């Protein structure tokens, strides 16, 4: 059964920094840890612009044009993806910390990989790819705890981020200490930041200080429970429009990219997968022809889909098709301007993302 949907799309002007250069990943040809080393050689030696200038970066990398679309600072620890935020921070200097006592007082710079682990040394301490603007109070509650899956929360932020003992079962089995858990909307974002750090600092990360997520190796980098958590989060929360836009902005700012946003498939090619995650959907959804011709692409699924989304290289969601139809159907997406897109298909708690090129 064939279903045809005509998608009206706006052709955007693609600036020089709107995406990775065409040859950026040409040397990423291997698999396993060989691929990780190749990526390290591509993204190393970025332009370290210093810790104080992170606030300058946030002016373009972390503005909310995706949820409330009001240009305020997009804080993963306070953002409410489905309604009004509990509070907002202005992008001006007035809401930067300073002192704080409660949520909403001010925002500061959150090192997802705690800076104490690498003794606050540059360039790690000022690398925007893993340093996000976050509410000061919530950042303080997170402290230097690893990110993980909370069993019983001892503290919960106003957007639902939690602090508590690691669940220590399922994908998070193997650790029982205190962890900090972001909301589902940003789990994948944070996982890909950690994987970036494992790659960008492959040459030094084995010598960093003790941290429950690190195994003091330069290849796998993460302890089994932490790696399982990161791979699960990256698979369950695929690359978003917000991440694509942030990756582009940070690339403009410091001259290197997070390869796991550009190519999320690299994650499984390097570290493998957590059994069962998205495997069924990935094997039953196909996109053809790719590169597309005549400004249209076909999406065939053996599984009933909840949604099909098209995201352009600027990170903008340009079309979303809700409940396309039943299984064993082909959906034809037409009137696609020439360019690069990410096509995301979802069914239940599974999501598959495919890159498409329109010639």
Image (cartoon, helix red, strand yellow):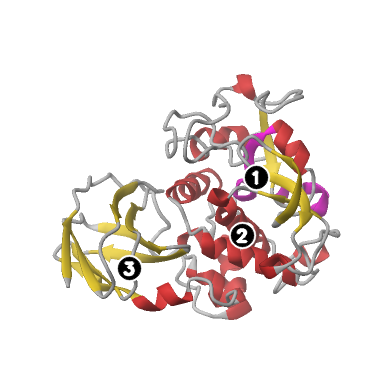
What residue sits right under mark 1 in the picture? 131
Q: Which label belongs to residue 179?
A: none
Answer yes or no: do the residues labelled 1 and 3 have beta carbons within 8 Å? no
Task: Categorize mark 2 by other alpha carbons within 10 Å: few (<14), some (14-19), many (20+).
Answer: many
Magenta-drawn segment: 115-135
Q: Is residue 217 left or right of residue 259?
A: right
Residue with the most extreme right position: 210
- The quarter of the displayed image where residue 141 is located: top right
Residue occupying image coordinates x 69% and y 57%: 149
- The quarter of the displayed image where residue 100 is located: top right
Q: Is residue 121 visible?
A: no
Tell me residue 223's x, y (percent). 76, 69
Q: Is residue 117 magenta?
A: yes
- The quarter of the displayed image where residue 215 is located: bottom right
Residue with the most extreme top position: 94
Q: CA distance from mark 1 to mark 3?
A: 38 Å
| Along the viewing direction, whichever of 159 and 251 lies nearer the viewer | 159
Q: Is residue 186 visible?
A: yes
Query: Viewer-nearest of labels 3 and 2?
Result: 3
Q: Is residue 178 magenta?
A: no
Answer yes or no: do the residues labelled 3 and 2 have beta carbons within 8 Å? no
| Along the viewing direction, whichever of 248 and 147 lies nearer the viewer | 147
Q: Is residue 274 left or right of residue 138?
A: left
Q: Secondary structure at mark 1?
A: strand
What residue sits right under mark 3 in the picture? 304
Q: Which label belongs to residue 196?
A: 2
Q: Secondary structure at mark 2?
A: helix
Tell me residue 287's x, y (percent). 29, 71
| Along the viewing direction, whichever of 106 and 229 lies nearer the viewer | 229
Residue occupying image coordinates x 76% and y 23%: 99
Residue occupying image coordinates x 62% and y 19%: 94
């Amino acid at each position: 059964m064939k279903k045809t949907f005509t998608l009206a799309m706006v052709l955007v002007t693609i600036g020089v920094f709107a995406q990775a250069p065409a040859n950026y990943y040409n040397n990423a040809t291997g698999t396993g840890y060989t691929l990780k080393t190749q990526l390290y050689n591509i993204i190393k030696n970025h332009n370290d612009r210093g810790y104080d200038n992170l606030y300058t970066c946030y002016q373009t990398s972390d503005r909310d044009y995706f949820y409330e679309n009001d240009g305020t600072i997009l804080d993963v620890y306070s953002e409410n993806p489905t309604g009004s935020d509990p509070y907002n921070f202005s992008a001006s200097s007035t809401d930067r910390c300073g002192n704080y006592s409660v949520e909403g007082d001010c925002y500061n710079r959150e090192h997802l990989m705690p800076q104490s682990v690498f003794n606050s040394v540059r360039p790690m301490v000022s690398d925007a790819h893993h340093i996000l603007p976050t509410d000061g109070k919530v950042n303080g509650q997170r402290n230097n705890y690893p990110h993980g899956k909370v069993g019983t929360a001892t503290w919960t932020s106003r957007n639902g981020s939690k602090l508590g003992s690691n669940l220590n079962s399922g994908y998070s089995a193997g650790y029982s200490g205190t962890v900090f858990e972001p909301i589902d909307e940003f789990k994948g974002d944070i996982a890909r930041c950690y994987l970036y750090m494992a790659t960008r600092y492959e040459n030094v990360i084995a010598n960093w200080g003790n941290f429950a997520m690190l195994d003091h190796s330069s290849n796998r980098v993460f302890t089994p429970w932490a790696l399982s958590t990161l791979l699960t989060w990256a698979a369950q929360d695929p690359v978003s429009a917000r991440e694509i836009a942030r990756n582009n902005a940070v690339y403009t700012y410091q001259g290197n990219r997070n390869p796991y946003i550009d190519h999320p498939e690299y994650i499984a090619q390097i570290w493998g997968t957590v059994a069962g995650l998205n495997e069924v959907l990935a094997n039953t959804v196909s996109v053809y022809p790719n590169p597309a011709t005549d400004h249209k692409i076909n999406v065939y699924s053996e599984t009933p889909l909840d949604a099909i989304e098209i995201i352009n290289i600027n990170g903008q969601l340009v079309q979303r098709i809700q409940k396309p139809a039943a299984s064993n159907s082909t959906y034809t997406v037409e009137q696609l301007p020439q360019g690069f897109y990410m096509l995301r298909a979802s069914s239940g708690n599974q999501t598959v993302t495919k890159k498409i090129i329109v010639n």
